[in-house]
Amino acid sequence: MDMLTLDINSVGMTDEQYFQLCRANRDLRFERSAKGELIIMPPAGGKSGGRNFRLTQQLANWTDTNDLGTGFDSSTGFKLPNGADRSPDAAWVRLERWKALTAEEQDRFVPLCPDFVAELRSKTDSIKGLRLKMQEYLDNGAQLGWLIDPQARKVEIYRPGLPVEVLDNPERLSGEPVLPGFVLNLAPIWA
């Protein structure tokens, strides 16, 4: 099932109403574009869910070995500076930025752009749409982004001020310098 995009500008949905909509429909994944479009995504299929689990697992294991920041899975919402509400498949925020948030800000959709984001393409995802989302993350302050495409066995690496780097069938990805010492093993994601 493909995602559904609805223009909700005419409704004038507030941030609080959007938050309540997401809480009331936990089986669906919602995002909201900077233009106010509501994007409804179905739950992940088995292969995509397993791949995302492996990605998040490796990021979580690395995060547990240091006190540099905190990681997030695909169910976490981020309120970007441009007004969009996004939920990357995996994300990480430097500890000092996370601790600067109030307890309420930490409990709701996080009002910042992660330092690191990863999007994992599923069979139904548009590569063009994911590329636009990756650029949006960079434009809003992300320092590193990975667009992982298991179907093509390619990874696109996004960094501020640099052209997108495309890797064909890599075995590993280094998170340096944003994620010091983190190396993602792609074998379980390609499987």
Image: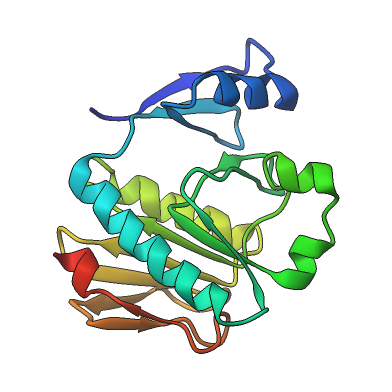
Residue drawn at (77%, 66%) of the image? 97
- Residue 91 percent coordinates (x, y): 53, 60
- Residue 103 percent coordinates (x, y): 82, 47
Does any portion of residue 123 appear in the rendered image?
A: no
Q: How is the image coloured?
A: rainbow
Vertical relation: 179 (above or below) 114: below
Instruction: Give the number of callouts.
Output: 0
Q: Is residue 137 left or right of residue 157?
A: right
Looking at the picture, tell me which residue is in the foreground, 73 or 42: 73
Picture quadrant where residue 45 is located: top left
Residue drawn at (71%, 39%) of the image? 108
Looking at the picture, tell me which residue is in the foreground, 148 or 59: 59
Query: Could you tell me which quadrant the N terminus lies in?
Result: top left
Q: Is residue 28 left or right of residue 148?
A: right
Residue drawn at (43%, 53%) of the image? 89
Does any portion of residue 121 appear in the rendered image?
A: yes
- Residue 102 percent coordinates (x, y): 85, 50
Picture quadrant where residue 40 is located: top left
Vertical relation: 167 (above or below) 33: below
Query: Could you tell me which quadrant the C terminus lies in?
Result: bottom left
- Residue 131 percent coordinates (x, y): 39, 55
Residue drawn at (46%, 83%) of the image? 182
Looking at the picture, tell me which residue is in the foreground, 13 or 61: 61
Q: Is residue 4 left or right of residue 73?
A: left
